[in-house]
């Protein structure tokens, strides 16, 4: 009986360690995804000066196109910002709910 209890305790400890490792892997995946996005962004920034030189020769029509694209990107950014804020609020509420359940 004692051996079974010992193995049960050991299993719980190992389960906690696996859970911790899994959460760390999620954090690492998020960091790698963020780094990849930053790298892509920086490579696009390196391309922008070349594009600007090419755009100097194009007519004004491209300026309005760029303004429209900028507006679209800004709307998308605002939408994503709102989604992040909503997710943050939901997570905060969920955490408080779980804490309250544990207290009761």
Image (cartoon, helix red, strand yellow):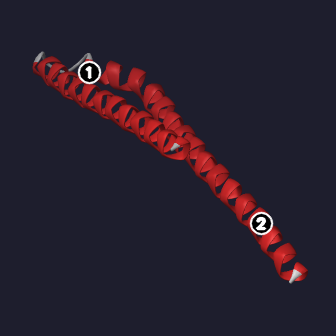
Quick check: 55 left or right of 15? left
What label sits on residue 14 in the rendered view?
A: 2
Would you say 86 lies left or right of 72 here? right
Indicate whether 8 appears above or below 29: below
Which tag, 1 or 2, sits closer to the chain's start?
Answer: 2
The residue at 29%/29% (across/down) is: 82
Q: Where is residue 86 in the image (x, y as percent from the top left)?
A: 32, 33
Q: How crowded is mark 2: few (under 14 residues within 10 Å), some or many (20 or more)?
A: few
Query: Alpha-carbon distance for marks 1 and 2?
Result: 60 Å
Helix, strand or loop status at disc 2: helix
Q: In which quarter of the image is the N terminus?
A: bottom right
Residue drawn at point x = 58 percent, y = 51 percent: 26
Quadrant assignment, res 77 = top left
The x and y percentages for residue 5 are 83, 75
2 to 56, vertically: above or below: below
The residue that label 1 is drawn on is 55
Write down the quadrant of residue 93 in the picture: top left
User: Are the residues flagged by discs 1 and 2 in contact, CB closer than 8 Å?
Assistant: no
Percent x, y of residue 72: 19, 28
Q: Nearer the viewer, residue 65 or 104?
A: 104
- Residue 32's x, y, as percent? 59, 45
């Amino acid at each position: 009986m004692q051996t079974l209890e010992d193995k049960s305790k050991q299993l719980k400890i190992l389960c906690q360690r696996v859970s911790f490792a899994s959460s760390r892997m999620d954090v690492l995946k998020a960091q790698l995804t963020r780094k990849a996005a930053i790298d892509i962004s920086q490579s696009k920034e390196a391309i922008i000066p070349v594009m600007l030189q090419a755009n100097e020769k194009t007519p004004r029509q491209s300026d309005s196109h760029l303004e429209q694209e900028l507006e679209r990107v800004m709307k998308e950014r605002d939408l994503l910002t709102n989604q992040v804020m909503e997710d943050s609020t939901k997570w905060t509420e969920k955490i408080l709910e779980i804490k309250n359940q544990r207290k009761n």
